[in-house]
């Protein structure tokens, strides 16, 4: 049977994307032209920040001293898992060389970028985990210099826990800057930072647009939209757990969609009844975000079989995909379109968001259909090399010259043929005859 939508999202409003692009382009151009003076002006305007931009070693130590020990312990658990997972990823990056034919060698090297700019969002929440996810992974990859930036809170600066996490993860420099001005400062190497080869980390629409416009001049991890999450649940799932997992992700913001895909109408109806009740137990600011997300962005999809559920999930390509169903190995083998996969009722997306190890900077808005999330691979250039010796040169030269002349690229052909001529003592007259 065709899938049945028990709940559908409202059409997304048309965004003023042209205005956003123009505003960001103007800001980037001004900072490019005026440098630190423009970045400081934007910090005063948007962050309401008049203090120091670069955190001193003393300021970093003072922030760490204000972080309660139990929070330090929790951050330590998260940092340890993130670091160990990144180290395991790095171990999969292999260098090699291979003799493709007698006398012709080729190989692959793994070279980390020289510098990275890591953005840690501010706003309603203090995103401690984002500091760990970005800076730690860059450090494990072997990046030479890491600058971290986050929006300062008026009169205080970056929250202490974020500063502590940035410092623990190994940031060389920490900037009290948010938004476009932070992205531009890291890209341009302002305030003593090393110009970033790559910019990473989530942020609001202005941050995402700034990264998009700078892409090409610098690398970026991805252009991310609002976070999203999909749960696959069969009749064996616990409706209360499913409902809480949807609520937990809905509190990210009013634009953050959550989806439930199930083959059990009874489970779907229980969850749909329970979610609004759970939202009302949250603090007001969280409840306000989750309420709109559930009302306007959430969908509940009823399917006839697990294969149909898997097909629907693959079509959505969610950032987070959580399976609460029987036969987890089948789902692990079958599903193919997600940023990160969470298996079983004892797992939750919140673990991945904060502390479990795999990176939480993930593709959104269906981009998981063609790309993965932040990893040591994003900070590493996979480059190739080759070396041809005399015994292999004639075969490669003849093949290259033949293909090049067919394509009409005589210069390419001659750069190959001249090597044959030198090897065999051919004359200039013969070369002229070969060129017609």
Image (spheres, rainbow, N blue to C red):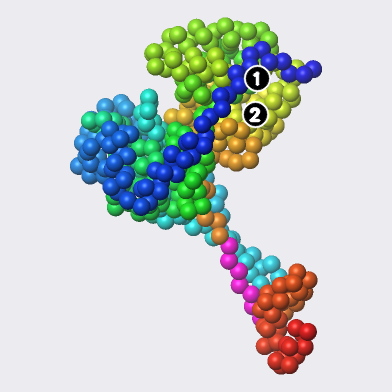
Q: Does the residue at mark 1 contact the one at mark 2 (Cβ under 8 Å)? A: yes
Q: How crowded is mark 1: few (under 14 residues within 10 Å), some or many (20 or more)?
A: many
From what the image shows, is residue 7 above or below residue 105? above
Chain-order first, disc 1 or disc 2 = 1
31 or 109, nearer to the observer: 31
- Specify the segment rendered in magenta: 384-390
Secondary structure category for the residue under label 1? strand
Q: Name the residue under label 1.
A: 261
Screen quadrant of the N terminus: top right
Q: Does the magenta stretch include residue 324?
A: no
- Determine the residue positioned at 47% across, 23% down: 253
Instruction: Determine the main secondary structure of the stretch shown in magenta.
Output: strand
Q: How crowded is mark 2: few (under 14 residues within 10 Å), some or many (20 or more)?
A: some
147 or 15, nearer to the observer: 15
- Determine the residue positioned at 50% across, 16% down: 292
- Determine the residue positioned at 39% across, 13% down: 284
Q: Name the residue under label 2.
A: 316
Secondary structure category for the residue under label 2? helix
């Amino acid at each position: 049977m065709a899938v049945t939508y028990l709940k559908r999202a409202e059409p997304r409003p048309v965004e003023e994307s042209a205005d956003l692009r123009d505003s960001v382009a103007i800001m980037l151009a001004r900072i490019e032209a005026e440098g630190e003076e423009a970045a400081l002006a934007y910090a005063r305007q948007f962050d309401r920040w008049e203090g120091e931009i670069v955190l001193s070693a003393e300021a970093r130590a003072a922030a760490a001293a204000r972080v309660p020990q139990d929070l330090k312990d929790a951050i330590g658990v998260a940092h340890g898992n993130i670091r160990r997972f990144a180290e395991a990823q790095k171990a999969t990056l292999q260098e090699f060389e291979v003799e493709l034919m007698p006398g012709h060698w080729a190989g692959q090297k793994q070279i980390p970028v020289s510098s990275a700019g890591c953005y840690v969002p501010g706003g309603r929440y203090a995103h401690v985990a984002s500091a760990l996810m970005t800076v730690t992974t860059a450090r494990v990859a072997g990046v030479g210099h890491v600058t971290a930036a986050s929006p300062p809170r008026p009169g205080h600066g970056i929250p202490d826990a974020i500063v502590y996490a940035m410092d623990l993860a190994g940031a060389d420099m920490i900037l009290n800057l948010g938004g476009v001005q932070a992205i531009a400062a890291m890209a341009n190497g302002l305030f003593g930072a090393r110009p970033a080869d790559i910019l990473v980390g989530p942020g609001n629409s202005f941050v995402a647009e700034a990264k998009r416009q700078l892409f090409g001049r610098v690398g970026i991890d991805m252009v991310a939209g609002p976070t999203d999450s999909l749960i696959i649940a069969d009749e064996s799932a616990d409706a209360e757990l499913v409902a809480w997992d949807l609520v937990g992700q809905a509190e990210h913001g009013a634009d953050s969609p959550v989806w439930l895909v199930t083959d059990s109408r009874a489970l779907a109806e229980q969850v749909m009844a329970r979610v609004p009740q759970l939202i009302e137990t949250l603090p007001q600011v969280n409840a306000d975000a989750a309420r709109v997300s559930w009302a306007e962005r959430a969908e509940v999809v009823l399917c006839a079989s697990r294969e149909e559920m898997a097909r629907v999930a693959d079509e959505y390509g969610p950032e987070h995909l959580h399976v609460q169903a029987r036969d987890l190995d089948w789902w692990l083998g079958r599903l193919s379109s997600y940023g990160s996969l969470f298996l079983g009722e004892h797992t939750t997306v919140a673990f991945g968001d904060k502390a479990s190890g795999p990176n939480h900077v993930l593709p959104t808005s269906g981009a998981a259909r063609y790309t993965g999330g932040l990893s040591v691979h994003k900070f590493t250039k996979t480059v190739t090399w080759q070396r041809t010796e005399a015994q292999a040169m004639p075969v490669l030269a003849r093949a290259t010259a033949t293909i090049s002349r067919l394509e009409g690229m005589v210069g390419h052909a001659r750069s190959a043929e001249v090597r044959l001529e030198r090897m065999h003592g051919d004359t200039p007259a013969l070369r002229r005859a070969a060129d017609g």
